[in-house]
Image: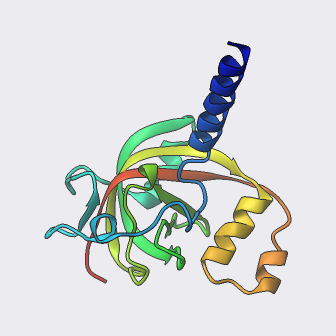
Amino acid sequence: MKKTLSAFALFLLIAIASNAQNGKTCNPAKEKPTAKNTKATAEGGYGLAISKEGATDVKLLEGKMENEKESFVKITGKVVEVCQVKGCWMTTDLGNGKTMRIRFKDYGFFMPKDCGGQTFYAQGIASWIETSIAELRHYAEDAGKSKAEIEKINAPEKALTFLAEGVILGKK
């Protein structure tokens, strides 16, 4: 009985730990782009079907989030950079010299690696998080940065991030 309870507790801890990392960094061995999770709808949508109506310009988001820890919102902006490993995150310009990373809920969908410069609409949760040095270096590696650029990352970063449940890509 003790062995069964111990095994169950271990399984539960592993499940919780893996959920805590959901969507934070790429794991190409685990989450694989497929025809289903990389194909856009006729309207250019990925993930949950959303509309463009009511979207806030991403450049206004930081001001709206000033006194909020997190908020469910719809945003629009331009894609700056995309994960070049498999399209599992993208960044957008906040208009103040900062960028915001957009991840995709449950790794349920991926963006085309060549969508930089395109307009997007996304619906999901904006939140303030602190990203570790290791994770920042991982993102830099995913983006194809040089080893020298990666090594320059030496402090964690508190920033506005976005977990999208659905995205619509427009034209460049």
Q: Quadrant of residue 15?
A: top right
Residue 123 in the image, given as x and y percentages of width and height:
34, 50
Please state which of residues 172 and 27 is positioned toward the viewer in this rendering. 27
Residue at position x 35%, y 69% in the image: 34
Q: Pick out the residue farthest to the left.
A: 42
Horizontal side of 50 relative to 38 (left or right) equals: left
Please state which of residues 26 and 122 is positioned toward the viewer in this rendering. 26
Horizontal side of 15 relative to 123 (left or right) equals: right
Picture colour scheme: rainbow
Is 40 situated above or below 20? below
Residue 157 in the image, given as x and y percentages of width and height:
73, 56
Residue at position x 71%, y 64% in the image: 136
Is 91 situated above or below 6? below
Please state which of residues 91 and 16 is positioned toward the viewer in this rendering. 16
Q: Quadrant of residue 118?
A: bottom left
Is 146 situated above or below 120? below
Residue 89 in the image, given as x and y percentages of width and height:
50, 65
Horizontal side of 59 relative to 46 (left or right) equals: right
How many dots with numbers?
A: 0
Question: Where, quadrant-wise, is the N terminus in this rendering?
Answer: top right
Residue at position x 54%, y 43% in the image: 127
Residue at position x 43%, y 50% in the image: 105
Residue 83 in the image, given as x and y percentages of width and height:
53, 74
Q: Quadrant of residue 24?
A: bottom right
